[in-house]
Amino acid sequence: MSKSKATIHGAVSLVNAIATGKGATLGISLKVEAIVEESPGTGITIESDNQSLSSRLINRTIEKVVPKKKLEKSKLSLILDSEIPTGYGLKSSSAISSAVALACAKLFQPKIVDSEILLAGIDASIETKVSITGAYDDATACYFGGFQVTDNYKRKTILSEKAPTNLIAVIFIPKSRKRGNVKKLKTLDTVFDKAWNLAKNKDYWNAMILNGLATSAILDSDPKIITDLVEEGALGASVSGNGPSIAAIVKKDSLTKIKKVFSSMEGRIITSEVNNKKAEVHGL
């Protein structure tokens, strides 16, 4: 019997990749832990306090990492513990699939490299229709932390650097989970392209604000919130992913003002420091 535990963090969007296939993200410290235990037998059991978790995504990820012959004679039990709310654009599925891939790799393929672990989760996300672009941008920010600017279709990192450590993400989780039609984001592809180019040139906050105004206009959030957040001291603010959560990146001294902007809305606020730590795994 052998056991391993992987820890991976979440991320927020700076530039949504759906319109152009190019995205930018920033790691935050909310985390996912995956413990995988292998014993003789067959089958996969998943234990999680999260009901909306895609077991298809997890099973497919395991199939990508664990060689078929070994999977046929191994019983795998998986315990998932996530601090990241699911279905709000905070990259929980990227973090979960990477954590599962990393924990399984430790047991079955210890020589596997980071990029292969990432691609296992990305391919599984596309094949189980959890993600449209495979979310290479999300996966890299969850796995490596910091700022990540990527070309999702080419699966290529264009820019990667650590984020200043004095920043906090203030995330608003609305009570209503309603999202607009994400396919409509393509109507503003030139705007998203401009936002991505800003990020590529390390102008992250303007990239995030431009992305925030464009995504909120399309995905049924109020663009005025983005403006209010910037007015109250947010460096950047945007709908994260395809929403409906909204993230503002702030320095500590603006925290109270930013929370106040959100306080009139129905929902809850979570705060998280930015994360520069790479994914970790160890045997238990």
Image (tube, grey):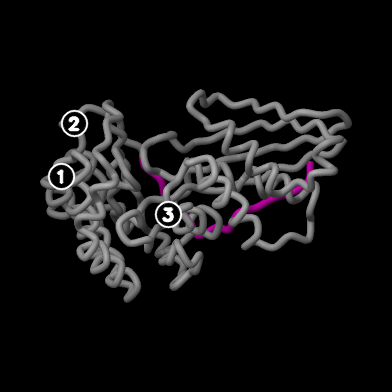
Residue 153 position by quadrant: bottom left
Q: Which residue is mark 1?
A: 225
Closer to the eye: label 3 or 2: 2
Magenta residue check for 238: no
Secondary structure under badge 1?
helix
The structure residue drawn at horizontal position 66% and vertical position 31%, both measured from the top left corner, is: 79
In this rendering, does residue 225 appear at all?
yes
Q: Please state the horizontal and vertical placement of residue 122, each as a whole percent of the image.
A: 54, 52
- How many C-alpha atoms fall within 10 Å of the one at disc 1: few (<14), some, or many (≥20)? some
In this rendering, does residue 23 appear at all?
no
- Viewed as shown, does residue 124 lie left or right of 166? right
Give, as a three-letter code, the residue at label 3: Val
Give, as a three-letter code, the residue at label 1: Ile
Q: Please state the extent of the stretch shown in magenta in the rendering.
A: 271-284
Please give the label number shown on residue 265: 2
The C terminus: image quadrant = top right
- Viewed as shown, does residue 254 lie left or right of 225? right
